[in-house]
Image (tube, rainbow, N blue to C red):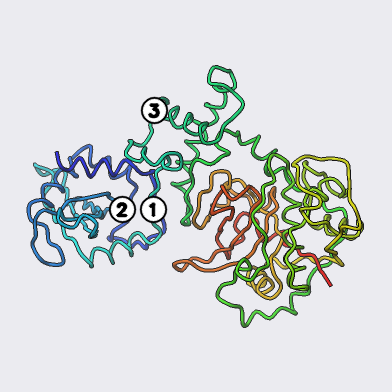
Amino acid sequence: MWFSLLFVGYFLFPNYVLSGANTLVGGWSKISEADFMEYEQQYSVMNEIGTNLLASPLVNGVRTSGLRPDVPFCFASQVVQGIKLKVFFQAHTDSQPDNKITCASVVWIVSWYKPPVQSIHTTCGNAQSLEAEHLCPKSRPKRDLLNEFDKHTTNMVRPTTDADVKILFDMFLEKYPRQYSSSSDEYNERFEIFKTNYQVIQHLNEIERGTAVYGITKFMDMSEEEYHRTLAPGFTRPLVPIQTLNSAELDTTNIPDSMDWRKHGAVTEVKNQGSCGSCWAFSTTGNVEGQWFLKHKKLISLSEQELVDCDTLDSGCGGGLPSNAYKSIEKLGGLEPEKDYPYVGEGEKCAIKRSDFKVFVNNSVALPKDEVKLAAWLAQNGPISIGINANLMQFYWGGISHPWKIFCNPKSLDHGVLIVGYGTENGTPFWIIKNSWGPDWGEEGYYRIYRGDGSCGLNNMATSSIVD
């Protein structure tokens, strides 16, 4: 009975498939929770492990008693004469409940023997921690999809039925109120979209190659078509030529290991484009804000609404392109500060006051696709405007996203954002991207994505204004 506590914890978390471990023929390989559960259903593996652990586990080579298991976090298998299963989990003693110890239980199963479970061995301690880190190097934060809404729900079993998901939907509507009532047809339609998106989230967490976690966001009741039409409407075609940087001039020999222009005062607060497809304007102003700061040592939050209303080369809430917008700023004569021409999230009649212009653009440049050169340019010159395929950003919570190309076509750019820095976490290189969906999305409004393989086409349309 006591071991059921372990499984309560086990079912709290999304079904992650841990990827990226080094595997050898005849060695241990990670398996998913679902694969492990198939063995559990056949052989009552976890109950056997629990009995063995309570009896007299080894902790750092010493026999002890009273050790209690918490949550399993990694599963592995090895083909021998039969099969071996390995489960890593945290445990604690009754006297020190906050002192977590990593344990590993190995079960050897030979199905043609009776009983099938031939041996069970459980050890806890430092060696198991190192082994777990080697086998599960990219394990992601174990976050319940429910706890984004209400902390007391974290003891609930992971939703599996429509009724369970409906509870989540109603909690979602409490946090993000909508205009439709629970008795309306739209409520039922939105619930079906929510339910579909919930399944998408589970799948995204299974196929993610990086450390990103996907969960319930404020866009959860938005269909894929609505999401792309509203938040990522696609770029218009370039209408004006833009010069290409001579990348031979870039010094790539002394690139810093990391750079974050937020820490150097070149980045304004995270903004929110709302339901207007004006991402291109936010990407443009973000770049110009950074360029002006580097040239004049003054950070001014600039008006996206001026571009939405007055940029005739682009399409306002229907999409646009930073390379067009730079030329429009030159033609208009400058940009007003946000406070003088505030954002309203829909197209209006152009109402610029040239006397309020505070920032000016002299030219613009297209940057190289080589990400080493992009990093060098960013480190030397400031934030970069880019286009990206936003297909997987709808449900992004945090971590380093590293999507498969089939799910994030690098040739299909539909969203304008701003690279503000880069770095490396546990050996994984990443870009830091400022988005325009408000600070209640992603990592306080920011997105981290893998750096080095052109993920989601982020290197295909990198540009910058030139400010004198």
Which secondary structure, mark 1?
loop
N-term mark: 1 or 2: 1
Q: Residue at x 58, y 38 (%)?
A: 219
449 lies above or below 34:
below
Q: Quadrant location of the C terminus?
A: bottom right
Please tell me in which quadrant of the rendered image residue 104 appears: bottom left
Residue at image x 47%, y 66%? 425
Q: Nearer the viewer, residue 66 or 27?
A: 66
> Tag 2, which secondary structure?
strand
- Which residue is at a point 8% across and 62% down the rendered structure image? 63
Looking at the picture, tell me which residue is in the foreground, 143 or 14.
Answer: 143
| 2 or 3: tag closer to the N-terminus | 2
Query: Dot 2 corresponds to which residue?
Result: 74
Q: CA distance from mark 2 to mark 3?
A: 25 Å
Marks 1 and 3 in Cβ contact (< 8 Å): no
Q: Which residue is mark 3?
A: 161
Q: Find out whether the residues at labels 1 and 2 contact each other: C-beta distance under 8 Å.
A: yes
First in sequence, mark 1 or 3: give its number: 1
Percent position of residue 109, x then y: 17, 48
Q: Is residue 81 left or right of residue 13?
A: left
Rounded to the nearest whole Å, what is the CA distance between mark 1 and mark 3? Answer: 25 Å
Q: Quadrant of residue 3?
A: top left
Question: In the rendered view of the protein, which quadrant contains the N terminus?
Answer: top left
Q: Amino acid at mark 2?
A: Cys
